[in-house]
Image: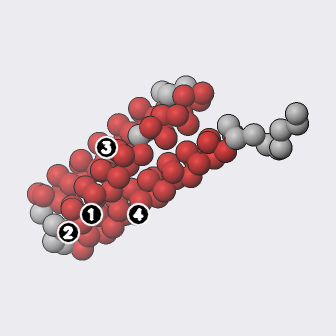
Amino acid sequence: MMDGFLYLYVFILAAFTGYEIIGRVPVILHTPLMSGSNFVHGIVLVGAIVVLGHADSTLEKVIGFIAVVLGAGNAAGGYVVTERMLEMFKPSGPKEG
């Protein structure tokens, strides 16, 4: 039972830490930061899958499942943001000349 509380504590601590870090990034740097840190989202997703694999109780499995879903959404969102950012730098029409 104590392991479940430890996992929940780590999850809540990671959520607050992530919120504080991202909340303090200036808007102009947020998109390049997201695109440059997609590998971190993948590591978080792998960690969530490992924790879910070691879950014993139903509560641990629910929390692990939520972590996997949020990690996957975060990784996919990072790639979507990167793609949109790169689209802004492509020429919009044919060159004249």
Label 2 packing within 10 angstroms: few (<14), some (14-19), many (20+): few
Residue position marked by numbered label 3 in the rendering: 14
Q: Which quadrant of the figure has residue 60?
A: bottom left
Q: Nearer the viewer, residue 1 or 48?
A: 48
Q: Secondary structure at mark 3?
A: helix
Q: Which mark is residue 49?
A: 1
The residue indicated by pointer 4 is 69
Q: Earlier in the sequence, mark 3 or mark 2?
A: 3
Relative vertical location of residue 1 with respect to residue 95 in this rendering, above or below: below
Say whether marks 2 and 1 touch (CB < 8 Å). Answer: yes
Q: Residue at x 70, y 41 (%)?
A: 90
Q: Amino acid at mark 1?
A: Ile
Residue in the image at 41% along x and 60% along y: 72
Q: Earlier in the sequence, mark 4 or mark 1?
A: 1
* Mark 1 / mark 3, whichever is N-terminal: 3
Which comes sooner in the sequence, label 3 or label 4?
3
